[in-house]
Amino acid sequence: MKKVTSLEPEDASKIEESVGEILEMIPSRVWNGRSLPIPVEEIAREVYGLRVCRVSHDQMKEVVGDRITDGTLSGLLLTGIGEIWINEEEAAHPEWGPQRKRFTVGHELGHFVLHQRGPAAIFCRSDDADEGLGTEPTPRAIPEVEANTFSAALMMPATFVRAEMRDGQSDEQSIAALMARFQASDKATRRRVETLRVID
Ligand SMILES: [Zn+2]
């Protein structure tokens, strides 16, 4: 399968647009359209009817079988039963667990919105081998990059990030501020800022 590190700009823009439409449709009891961080898990549950469950890595492995041979599974989407499974060991990590969990829920929701068709299917998110080592992205199959793009756009909506970036801070100060505002990891935040500089 063809692997890429980023989408063609027009494909990325389409995902940005559909996330923009989704954010506008969210009922105000789930999100008021202003507050941060974006309640990714509540959106999956209340808007899409998906249950978000913490599950051990062994249980996840049992479900995927031989489809994934190496790397850690961060999340799974089981469309048949409408569940998103989150790696409970990762989610419990004191430094990056909550941010990773948010991104993984967004990723699986991206598969649900963009890719689920026909019979029940399983989608997964496997570990970023390069997590924490700069922003150089790992080549991945296109649906995986699409799901990551969806998650980043949902967690860090373009208009909100641009509004936060305008106050003349240095890059490092802004990254730290954005991470705190959006409850996103260092790497996801840096990638989001780079993407928004490119697509403008
Ligand atoms: Zn995936």
Image: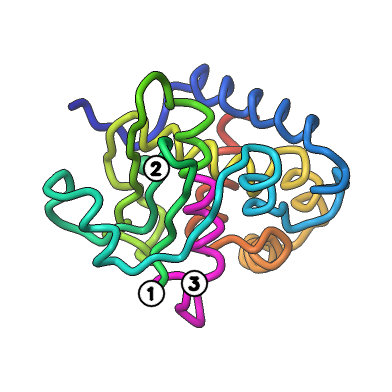
Q: In this view, does 9 lie above or below 22?
A: above
Q: Which residues, given as a range, are shown in magenta?
A: 90-107
**Residue 105 lies in magenta, yes or no?**
yes
Give the labeled residue for mark 2: 78
In this rendering, would 127 be left or right of 194?
left
Seen from this angle, which residue lies furthest bottom? 94
Question: Are the two marked residues, 2 and 3, in contact with CB atoms closer than 8 angstroms?
Answer: no
Q: Residue tagged by mark 3?
A: 97
Amino acid type of the residue that numbered disc 2 sits on in the rendered structure: Leu
Decide whether the magenta segment is chiefly helix, strand or loop.
helix
Distance of mark 1 from mark 2, alpha carbons? 19 Å
Q: Is residue 83 left or right of residue 39?
A: left
Q: Is mark 2 on a helix, strand or loop?
A: strand
| Circle 3: residue type | Gly
Q: Which residue lies furthest to the front in this view?
A: 81
Of marks 2 and 3, which one's residue comes earlier in the chain? 2
Residue at horizontal 49 percent and vertical 33 percent from the top: 112
Q: What residue type is labelled 1?
A: Glu
Residue bearing the label numbered 1: 89
Q: Earlier in the sequence, mark 1 or mark 2?
A: 2
Image quadrant where one finds the N terminus = top left
Comes first in the chain, label 3 or label 1? 1
